[in-house]
Amino acid sequence: MAAGSPYLRVSYAETNRIFPEPYQRVVVTAALVALLAVPFFGSGYLLHLMNLTFLAVIGAVGLNLLTGYCGQVSLGHASFMAIGAFVTAILTNLYAAPFWLAVPASCIIGAAVGFVVGLPALRFRGIYLAITTLAMHYAIIFILTTYQAKFGSSATAGISIPAPVIGSWQIEGGRSWYYVLLLTGVATVLFGLNLSRSYVGRAWVAIRDRDIAAASVGINVTRFKLLAFVTSAALAALAGSLGAYFSGVVTVEAYTLELAILYLAMIIVGGMGSIAGSVLGAVFMTLLPFWIEHGFDMLPPNWRLGSTSYGLQEAAIGIVIILFLLFEPKGLIEIYRRIALYFERWPFRYRELSPAERR
């Protein structure tokens, strides 16, 4: 490869750039311009779907930092989102806390709970860690259910939240929320990308691959595991807080174990240990139910079987997880990498050596 080639790496700094290839910077710039223009051309339904996707991206990045990078399996991600939502509801309704104060406070409290949960999780790994976080999920949901039943308007209606106000600007409507969530989603992705390239991210990867070896080279395994739980919980609480404001109501029924499984599906489908994979997985899994529903709407009326589309939406999550684990365990991001590598090396083609040639 020529010395002037844009794909030649001559230093670690070049290898560690967020967008190492020239075309990536062009694609990302074009994507951002297109996203900024969506509210001027898209329908209200499209804006709603995009807002849901931005919220999913925030939560997926947080879970991928914990599970994909640090290797700590968690089934309690939905409970951290519930904490962020309920703290926001309490601060807004009881203390009239403004938007700029309620959201950071929700993240701080979510991070504090993540620290507490991370303490017993330090002694477990694998399936035992998953069961520990699952038990924590049900404990938190029980507490929030009790609070909703006693202090909410009803046991099932949830707790209403007024539209947030920043200065003289009231964040209300699909277009206003689009830009708020887009900005927050982009900031979260950049935070995840920079954190994953830092000493913290490399320490997490070392712990994920072999925690004993990581400890032997001087990495404080306890400290970095706790940091992973705290960071993931804070981002989950951020998604829950913004989601509460966006929907205008907080109800514990929205934060089920199925939601935690959905976020696991996002990082599995998108790619474990990849921030870009978190984005791809969040987009795919958020829009998948709507694609299925749209497909049923295109069928003749006599072919529609009542709630069959809803059942398929639920089953599709498990089916997609199984298919990706069987045929593409590295997720959508690996498909992108193979396609990008093909065009970068074109017209040359990589061919694996046969067993006879390896001898």
Image: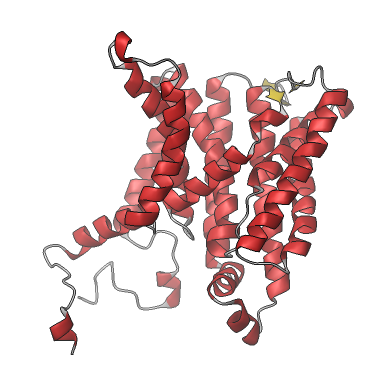
Along the line of sight, which residue is nearer the eye, 76 or 319? Answer: 319
Query: Vertically, is 88 above or below 139?
Result: above
User: Which residue is found at the position 55% from the left and 55% from the top?
Assistant: 64
In percent of the image, x 74 and y 50: which residue is there? Answer: 136
Above or below 36: residue 79: below
For the C terminus, the quadrant is: bottom left
* Residue 328 in view here: no
- In the rendered image, the quadrant that contains the N terminus is bottom left
The residue nearer to you, when weighing 225 against 320, is 320
Task: Give how far across and how far down residue 104 sits, in percent.
Answer: 75, 42
Instruction: Mark yes or no: residue 141 visible.
Output: yes
Residue 247, image x and y in percent?
64, 24
Which of the colour schemes (rainbow, by chain, secondary structure, one colour) is used? secondary structure
Reply above or below: 303 against 107. Answer: above
Residue 72 spot, x, y in % from top left: 61, 62
Q: Residue furthest top?
A: 301
Q: Is residue 338 left or right of residue 110?
A: left
Q: Name which quarter of the figure residue 295 lies in.
A: top left
Q: What residue appears at the point 44 percent right and 65 percent down from the top-left corner?
A: 17
Displayed quadrant of residue 289: top left
Residue under the point 80% across and 17% down: 154
* In the displayed structure image, the side of residue 4 where residue 283 appears, left or right: right
| 335 on left or right of 293 | left
Outermost residue toward the left in this view: 347
Q: Is residue 220 left or right of residue 105?
A: left
Closer to the camera in the image, 350 or 125: 125
